[in-house]
Amino acid sequence: MQYGYIRAWDDSEAAHQRAQVAAKRPDVIYQDDATDNSAWLALQNQLAPGDTLIVASLDRLGMSLEAIVLLLEQLLAAGITVATGAAGDFVARDGAMTDLTQEKMTLLAVATQADRILLQERMRLGKVQMMQDPSFREGRPPVLTPVKERAVLRYLETHTQIQTADHYGVSRATVTRAVRRAKDAALAEQAQSKIADKK
């Protein structure tokens, strides 16, 4: 069997990859988006010795060079041939990577390292610029704005935390933290009120 696999951020990219993969005439094509790998998990259960896996490019097999190499080694050990639809060449077959694939992996490693250095530099420069803004705050931005957090707390009066998290599209942990902040604020207000009463 020949299996195609697509992992794309949007419909346009998916269509581009599908055209490349379909050029190798796979029997079936599995597709994931960037946030889901259920199709890949299902495909792994179908792959058997002698099968061929077709992807548009090597980076569809993993998020890092290390992950791609590890997966290729696992597929080779299982007797699975790997091919790219773009160039129409075999990446790995008969238990070994082709010479062309090894050259590509070397170039990919160099490009990955260069991209990582550039990204780190851009992030550093971006942070320096943001720190010049008086409103800049270190760390991740809050998931809930003050207005949305108040709405979450009102919704919680008649619903469970799980229902509230689903309704507002946030994690249960986010809802739990909102509740904790509300309780802390209430306790602080009570403490201040007692101090004022004593005066």
Image: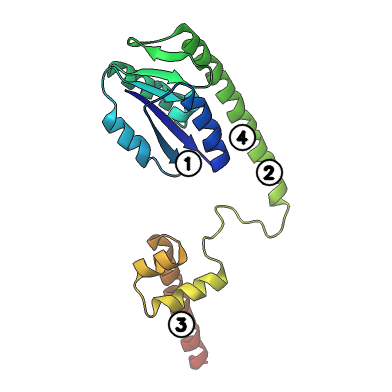
Cα separation, mark 3 vs mark 1, equals 48 Å
Mark 1 to mark 2 CA distance (whole Å):
26 Å
Q: Nearer the viewer, mark 1 or mark 2?
A: 1
Residues under labels 4 and 2: Cα distance? 10 Å
Q: Tell me the element at label 3.
A: helix
The answer to which of marks 4 and 1 sits earlier in the sequence is: 1
> Closer to the N terminus: mark 4 or mark 3?
4
* Residue drawn at x 41%, y 43% as measured from the top left: 36
Residue type at mark 3: give it: Ala
Q: Position of residue 6 (x, y in %)?
A: 45, 33
Q: Position of residue 129 (x, y in %)?
A: 72, 47
Earlier residue among tags 4 and 2: 4
Viewer-side label of 4, 1: 1
Contact flag, marks 4 and 3 (Cβ < 8 Å) = no
The reply to whether dot 4 and dot 2 touch (C-beta < 8 Å) is no
List the residue tagged with mark 3. Answer: 191
Looking at the picture, which amino acid does disc 2 mark?
Gly
